[in-house]
Structures are given as structure tokens and as C-alpha cells.
Amino acid sequence: MGMKTPSVMEGFLRYDLPLLVSYPRSGTNWIRYIIEYISGQPTPGQPRLHTGGNFIIDRAHKAYPILHQHPKAILVIRDYRECLLRSLPDLWEQIPVPAKFLQVEWGKTPPVWYALNIEAFDRFRGDKLLLYYEDLIQDSASQVWEISEFLGLDTAKTEDFVADLETRCQESIRAYTSGGHTAFTAKNPKNFSYHANKHLTPALSAEFDAFFSSQYPHLFEKYLKRYTTCRSQL
């Protein structure tokens, strides 16, 4: 077998760098923009601010097979309903049963990656940083500082970024949409239930919670309990 082709799905073979772990549509591009702006270096994938291969981090959506090879890891988590239904609306139309949908192992970005990435992060024994998409939006300044300190980035440039946070956020959205992506919640970024409300009844929404709490009780208690239906609708 030949060498794996570097990709945003499975990583860019930079095992000497921290790994950014995320399921698609979890805020990765905002994090990459933050890192690139402050560091002045590129990150793998569609260019945000810088090009070239002098990466400051590696990143992967299918991170669980390779995470242990990296010295440090950042995991960003988003409500399972939101990122999965945002990424896979057609699959949900085919399999509109949470317990079946969430166990699909085929396709470009199978739903099972969501839990497997968290499981691998939980086992990881290197330095690691846990981020939540919702916190990145609601409390951006403190999250920017956490990212900067974890990666050892320049303090003065971090202060500059935080001082004009709204401008940085709008520039990041423009960079994202100019690449052909759609930012459905750009006008209301704190609408954290947009896709759940679009695709799910309250009963189906609760079935997502039931699946993760029963199939991954340890991970649910430690990482996902904030997303239970009663809390997400507050």
C-alpha cells in the first residue's frame, strides 16, 4: 500500500505538530483564522490568511486513528444535532432515525466519527485543550486567549486580535463564504439550534440525547451533557 494522501479528513502527516480535531461544521475555520492571524503561519486546508506548507498545526476530521501520534491536541465540539445535520442533511433524509443515523460508518464523513474523535481525545495523554463551538461564539475573547496560550502564540498579537474581535469575526466569515461555503447562522451566530429546529421534532431531538447517553455514558457525562434537549432550548 502507498502512503496516505494528506487531507483535511485524515490529516497532513505532520505528527510533530499539535492536531486540531473536529467533526465538520464545528467551527474549525474560525479557529484556524484565529491561529493564522496571531501566528502569521498557515494551517492545512482551504487558505484563510496564509498559504504555503509552513504549518503551525495539523488538522483532521477523522482524527481518532492518528491522534496518539501527535504531541498536543485541540478538540472542538459542537452540538451533535447541529454539526451532523448541517453536514449530512441528505443522509438524515434517507435515515431519519437517530439510533440508526448516528451509527452509520460509511460515506465521506460518517456520523460515527463524532464520538470516535471524542473517545480518542479522552484517551490522549499528551497536552490537550477542549473547546466548544458555542463558547467560541459567546465568549470569544477568553477562548482566543486559551488557544493562544496553549499554542504559545505571541501575547501582543493576541491582544490586538481581541481588541477588535468583531472585525476579526466578520473577516473570518467573509473568508469562509468566499470559498463557496454557506454560513447559515451568520446573521444570528448565537442561534445554536438552527439545524435541529429545521430537521427535528422535540421527540427526535431527545432521541439524539438518549443515544449518546446510553451508548457513550462516560463521554456523555464528561463532554456532551450540556447538549441535552432541555438545556439546548434555553
Image (cartoon, rainbow, N blue to C red):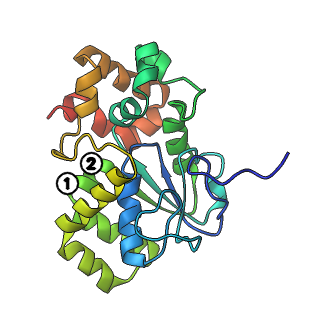
Residue 134 has which mark?
2
Residue 30, quarter of picture: bottom left
Q: Residues within 10 Å of mark 1 (few under 14, many from 20)?
A: few
Looking at the image, residue 83 lies above or below residue 18: above
Give the residue at x 16% y 44%: 188
Is residue 95 visible in the rendered structure shown here? no
Query: What mark, if any, has residue 201 been given in the picture?
Result: none
* Residue at 24 percent of width and 61 percent of height: 169
Residue drawn at x 45%, y 39% is 219
Numbered marks: total? 2
Q: Tell me the tag on residue 138.
A: 1
> Where is residue 184, by image quadrant?
top left
Quadrant containing the C terminus is top left
Marks 1/2 in contact by CB < 8 Å: the verdict is yes
Q: Is residue 113 above or below residue 3?
A: above
Give x and y (percent) for residue 164.
18, 73
Which quadrant, please, contains the N terminus? top right
Q: Residues within 10 Å of mark 2 (few under 14, many from 20)?
A: some
Query: Is residue 144 toward the left or the right of residue 41 in the image?
Result: left
Residue furthest bottom in the image: 156
In the rendered image, residue 59, in percent from the top left (x then y), is placed at 54, 57
Q: Position of residue 113 (x, y in %)?
A: 54, 37
> In terms of depth relative to the viewer, which is nearer, 141 or 106?
106
Residue occupying image coordinates x 48% and y 24%: 102
Q: Give the percent coordinates (x, y) of residue 7.
A: 61, 51
Q: Residue 142 is drawn in which quadrant? A: bottom left
Kind of residue at disc 1: Gln
In three-dimensional space, the C-alpha distance between marks 1 and 2, rounded to whole angstroms, equals: 6 Å
Of residue 176 and residue 6, the one placed in the foreground of this image is 176
Q: Is residue 12 left or right of residue 139?
A: right
Q: Amino acid at mark 2?
A: Glu
Q: Secondary structure at mark 2?
A: helix
